[in-house]
Amino acid sequence: MKKMSTERIEPEQEVQSRRTRSIRIEIAPWTIFSLVLVFAGLWIFLRLLPVVLVLVGALMIVGTLAPAVAWLEQRGLPRGLGIAIVFTVLSVATVLIFVLTIPELVKQVRSLINMEPALRERLAAWFAQSPLTANLADTMRNVHYDALITSSAASVLTFFTLVVESIAYGFGAIFLALYIMLDRDRLRGALFAVVPRTHHIRLSRILIHLNTIVGGYIRGQAITSGLMAAFIFVLLTACGIPNALVIAVFGGLADVLPYIGIFLTMGPAVAAALPFGTVIVTVVLVLMLIYEEFESRVLVPVVYGHAMRLPSSVVLFSLIAGATLFGIIGALLALPVAATILMLIDKLRVELPGETEQAGDTERRKKDDHSEREYTRRTEGMPAEEASAIAVEMSGVRKKTEDDPAA
């Protein structure tokens, strides 16, 4: 009996001890310090966001113009002279575009303002033909611009301030890009000096691929936007629609925005064709749809080449995330940022969950290790600035062989 009572008491004591046991959660001081640093970094990043955008814009300009400067260097021109020629040609071309288009744009905007009542009445009459759009016709006839202008005066002032700030930041990005290109070797040497010598080859490969991504994206945007503007101008001029230049310039600028750009380019062109009859509207709509399909299926893959290499799902998610966080600027930067992140995961050998190493990955790892050993041997005792040039040269040769194995 005593033994049985002892066996009954011991479990009760254990239960009581478990009930009174306390759990202590201790956070290491280094963890707290790391969290503080992360939040402080995010706060500084948000406060300095305009400065960060200027730096990003400057790096994009550098990535866009660097191939032209390199091409001139290969022809025997000094680097400084090549940079001067590229920036001079770009400045002259920009000034000529503005001189040739701004007066005509102002003229056509005035013409649109003078024609607005007649165009609005034609559109209202066209909408009134269908019972489904009759209410829209009444709304268009009863538009009062005085109240609209009065209520949006503050918004116009804010928009004008934003435009002025954007222009100032744009000039800042251009001059910063000029300084970065002129002082390339010292800046690159300073970057390589803070990175261990064993990682220089990997860093140089990242810089080369980043240059390819950014430069390819900007050049592709410029080409596709220019071709879109030219197509809209030719189409509207051939159809006899006035103010074609204004609509074409707006369409070319809107074409920069992926996915939603199609609506912003087609909308004004089709709206401008509405007063000229169903046949003209159909022709403009059909040809715009054909060109949009041609651009997405044929032109974009040819122009961008292998610069982006993004799946469609990643493209869509990147655009949504970028537009949600930073608006139009975020949408414009979403694709190169996403492509850069995927490139970094690949070049830094980040092992993702569920991913198994393939035979090609093993071979590439061996080549990387061999390149790093060879680079360490060749640059032993060499300053970081000279060593960085050798690293970039070796990585450039490696990239050419990967892009064109036959070479």
Image (cartoon, rainbow, N blue to C red):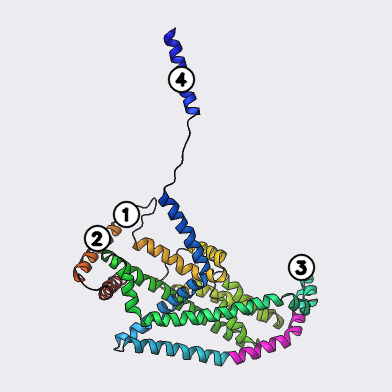
Which numbered disc, 3 or 4, marks the residue that appears first in the sequence?
4
Q: Report how far apart the C-alphas of labels 3 and 4 lie in the structure.
A: 80 Å
In this orientation, which residue lies closer to the viewer: 136 or 151? 151
Secondary structure that dominates the magenta span: helix
The kind of residue tagged 2 is Lys
**Residue corresponding to mark 4:** 11
Q: Which residues are magenta?
A: 102-123
Q: Nearer the viewer, mark 3 or mark 4?
A: 4
Question: Which quadrant of the figure contains the N terminus?
Answer: top left
Q: Nearer the viewer, mark 3 or mark 1?
A: 1
Question: Which quadrant of the figure contains the C terminus?
Answer: bottom left
**Residue 31 vertical placement versus 113 (above, below):** above
**Residue 343 vertical placement versus 382 (above, below):** above
**Residue corresponding to mark 2:** 366
**Residue corresponding to mark 3:** 132
**Residue corresponding to mark 1:** 357
Identify the residue at image location x=45%, y=58%.
37
Mark 4 closeness class: few <14, some 14–19, many ≥20 residues within 10 Å: few
The kind of residue tagged 3 is Leu
**Residue 373 vertical placement versus 227 (above, below):** above
Residue 385 seen from this side: yes
